[in-house]
């Protein structure tokens, strides 16, 4: 068999089940990738090499006896360092939690293990998930560029083949942003559908845990394991939407290369029979202001004691956000929650008319980490981090499921994604629509080439 790390997650699981590859071989292939890629992308905070090899051996012994744990039997998965893995560090990218070892698995990790997944590594995060940069992680498609955040380590690790899938957290876009910039499928599930037990909070009323994978099918396999049973969950939507709403207010500003790819995709899905109509849900600048008030208020509440006792232990950017949050008033928070309800009602209304909502996953391709002000062709400038969350914040506020799905490439070889938003608890329908959009767009997956100093193949 060719390099097992080149398999998709579902292909790897199938290969273990048919005996074409062992779980140990999958772990060894990922460890080899880690050795070649990590000096260049710094995606991981810790690697449980011995533990994962031992767990893989247990999976292989069980497979030989005809015992299967579940759909992910023997497949190596990485976990963002905001999420507890028993016996491993959970440090949230912060000096404040240096040396903190988790005593038990987070709920999402428990579910993955129960389905047979092998937890291989922890991935880098922006400090306390409070930012978009994820230093020092770099993007495998161009290691001079950022992977996005705050789940940038998960995005870079899966893109480089260091794991077959990864967990991220998404509060204001932190799964979808790095997925778009790293060429992955990233799902923010319906708020509350995946337990956040064992996850360090950023903002309680916004936090979600979502899968990041190389394919739509892989993402579906992970979310079906992660999401708890919900008797009210409606049936999956039909695969190809017949009517889709395009959020016109999010189509500007736009890098020309992103606009070119998205324009082509919209034309192709229309040619494939989907009626696409432009609608408007909310003023994006107002949405960013609202989500910032809620996020900053809840983060300030969680960090209040540490902020008062050890402010010098926070990074400069996170400390500045916390200081702003401390100055917000209760009335600001209540007003923001009221507007949040209005956005939810508006998006629900749109989704009663349309099968799906389409929006950009990002306005730009992966930026350089030292450029904090983005410049668009009309001469307009915009701060980097608010621009990166601009197309993502609406359904973080409303709680609707949303996925970033790769659909094309810029002329310099960087991935471009589209965002698909669905009704609550229709994650499978959203992902099914993502597969249909990729098919209509003529999506051809690629793998990033390893840096010249790394031996081996991509």
Image: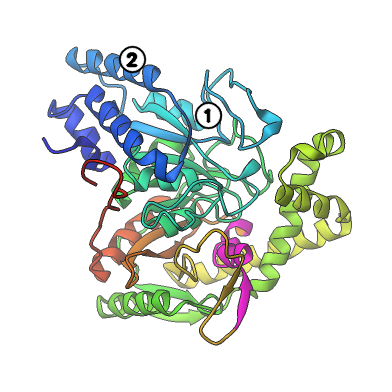
> What x and y, as percent, mark residue 123?
48, 37
> What x and y, as percent, mark residue 380?
60, 82
Task: Label 2, secondary structure: give it.
Answer: helix
The residue carrying mark 2 is 54
Report the magenta residues as a range: 380-397
Mark 1 or mark 2: which is in front?
2
> What x and y, as percent, mark residue 105?
52, 23
Colour setting: rainbow
Residue 369 in view in this figure: yes
Residue 236 in view in this figure: no
Q: Is residue 313 above or below residue 363?
A: above
Rendered image quadrant of residue 430? bottom left
Residue at the far bottom: name it. Answer: 378
Within 10 angstroms of label 1, few (less than 14), some, or many (20 or more) residues? Answer: many
Rendered image quadrant of residue 389? bottom right
Q: CA distance from mark 1 to mark 2?
A: 22 Å
The residue carrying mark 1 is 107
As rendered, which of 456 and 131 lies closer to the eye? 456
Q: Residue at x 31, y 81 (%)?
A: 267
Q: Is residue 383 above or below residue 309?
A: below
Rendered image quadrant of residue 404? bottom left
Task: Label 1, secondary structure: give it.
Answer: helix
Give the left or right position of residue 51, taking residue 401 as reference.
Answer: left
Q: Which SS does the magenta portion mostly show?
A: helix
Q: Residue at x 32, y 30 (%)?
A: 31
As rendered, which of 383 and 207 lies closer to the eye? 383
Q: Residue at x 42, y 67 (%)?
A: 355
């Amino acid at each position: 068999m060719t390099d097992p790390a080149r398999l998709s997650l579902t292909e790897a699981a199938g290969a273990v089940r048919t005996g074409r590859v062992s779980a140990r071989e999958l772990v060894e292939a990922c460890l080899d990738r880690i050795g070649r890629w990590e000096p260049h992308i710094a995606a991981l905070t810790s690697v449980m090499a011995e533990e994962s090899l031992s767990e893989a051996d247990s999976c292989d012994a069980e497979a030989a006896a005809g015992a299967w744990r579940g759909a992910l039997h023997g497949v190596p998965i990485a976990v963002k360092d905001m999420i507890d893995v028993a016996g491993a560090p959970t440090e949230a990218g912060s000096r404040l939690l240096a040396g903190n070892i988790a005593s038990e698995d987070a709920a999402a990790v428990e579910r993955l293990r129960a389905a047979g997944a092998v937890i291989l590594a922890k991935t880098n995060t922006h400090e306390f998930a409070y930012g978009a940069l994820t230093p020092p992680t770099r993007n495998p498609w161009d290691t001079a560029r950022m992977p996005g955040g705050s789940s940038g380590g998960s995005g870079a690790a899966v893109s480089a083949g260091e794991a077959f899938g990864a967990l991220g957290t998404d509060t204001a876009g932190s799964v979808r942003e790095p997925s778009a910039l790293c060429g992955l499928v990233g799902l923010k599930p319906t708020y509350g559908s995946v337990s956040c037990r064992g996850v360090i909070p950023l903002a309680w009323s916004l936090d979600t845990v979502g899968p990041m994978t190389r394919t739509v099918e892989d993402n579906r396999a992970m979310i079906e394991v992660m999401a708890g049973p919900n008797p009210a969950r409606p049936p999956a939507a039909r695969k190809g939407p017949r009517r889709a709403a395009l959020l016109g207010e999010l189509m500007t500003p736009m890098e020309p290369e992103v606009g070119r790819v998205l324009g082509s995709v919209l034309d192709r899905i229309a040619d494939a029979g989907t009626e696409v109509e432009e609608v408007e849900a909310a003023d994006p600048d107002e949405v960013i202001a609202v989500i910032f008030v809620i996020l900053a208020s809840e983060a300030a509440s969680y960090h209040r004691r540490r902020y008062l006792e050890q402010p010098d232990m926070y990074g400069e950017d996170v400390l500045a956000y916390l200081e702003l949050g401390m100055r917000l008033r209760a009335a600001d928070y209540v007003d923001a929650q009221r507007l949040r309800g209005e956005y939810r009602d508006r998006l629900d209304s749109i989704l009663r008319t349309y099968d799906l909502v389409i929006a950009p996953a990002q306005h730009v391709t992966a930026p350089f980490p030292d450029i904090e002000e983005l410049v668009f062709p009309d001469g307009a400038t915009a701060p980097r981090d608010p621009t990166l969350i601009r197309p993502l914040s609406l359904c973080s506020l409303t709680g609707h499921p949303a996925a970033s799905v790769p659909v094309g490439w810029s002329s310099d070889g960087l991935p471009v994604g589209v965002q698909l938003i669905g009704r609550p608890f229709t994650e499978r329908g959203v992902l099914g629509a993502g597969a249909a959009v990729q098919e209509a767009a003529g999506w051809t997956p690629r793998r990033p080439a390893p840096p010249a100093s790394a031996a081996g193949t991509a």
